[in-house]
Amino acid sequence: MKLLALDTSTHYLSLALSDGDKVSVFHENVDQKHAEQTLPQVSRLLAARGMRLADLDAIVFGQGPGSFTGLRIACGLAQGLAYSAGLPVIAIPTIDNVAHQAGADNVLVCLDARMRQVYTAAYQTGPEWRRLSAIEVCDPDQVALPADIDVAAGDGFASYPALLAGQRPQLMVLDQLRPHASAYLALARSGRYPATHPREAELLYIRNKVALTSIEQQQARQS
């Protein structure tokens, strides 16, 4: 499959372009400049391969959870690129991405959700890949590491070291893992995530809304 994957859920802008077995990657900390840098970097990746958007089979994006602004940027850009080239989109949870990168039989992922909370879910990876628990947001002290977990993955463990207090020495900790576009390519090829029309692209916020639209704000003032 020929795919373009993008993630803007963290401070990193992560892009990956696949042309069969060949993959080109851009993965850099751009702070808050995702909106300015994504399209130029996508153009560079395509130009370097002599490809056009219309040559692709789909646009893949990280649907969340993550930065609210970042998620909206990724979804909007994926929709715009897909509409312009008549392509479907494939939305994949960011936390699934980190679980895939961990590459262990049993993984607990914790991503820093800010506001002193984490996004978390447990996974069985490998040939029988499956999510063992729902993706949820909670306070760090509510996270329990099951006894059969082999790997603790995600920056939530770096942000809240107390999560690992008293854990067995053989537990592998990959606390620098964050969503990476190249992992989305492998997940998209797995067939577990449906390709949909761009208008059906959905975000996965998890946390209740912390910002109101202008209409909601007006309604709140009038009530």
Image (tube, rainbow, N blue to C red):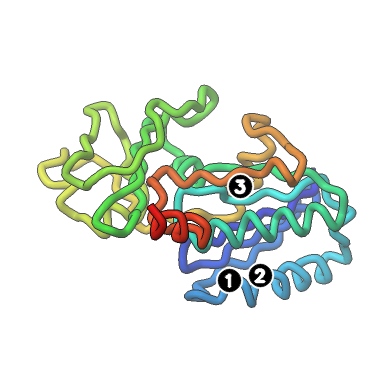
The residue indicated by pointer 1 is 34
Residue 4 found in image quarter: bottom right
C-alpha span from label 2 to label 3: 17 Å
- Residue 123 place in picture, x, y as percent: 41, 31
- Residue 149 place in picture, x, y as percent: 29, 32
Secondary element under disc 3, as helix, strand or loop, is helix
**Nearer the observer, 222 or 155:** 222
**Between marks 3 and 1 in the image, the one whose residue lies nearer the viewer:** 1
Disc 2 marks which amino acid?
Thr
- Residue 124 place in picture, x, y as percent: 43, 28
Disc 1 marks which amino acid?
His
Secondary element under disc 2, as helix, strand or loop, is helix
Horizontally, residue 138 falls left or right of residue 26, namely left
The residue indicated by pointer 2 is 38
Q: Residue furthest top?
A: 128
Disc 3 marks which amino acid?
Tyr
Secondary element under disc 1, as helix, strand or loop, is helix
Cβ–Cβ under 8 Å for marks 2 and 1: yes
Residue 127 lies, with reference to residue 205, above or below; the image says: above
Total marks shown come to: 3
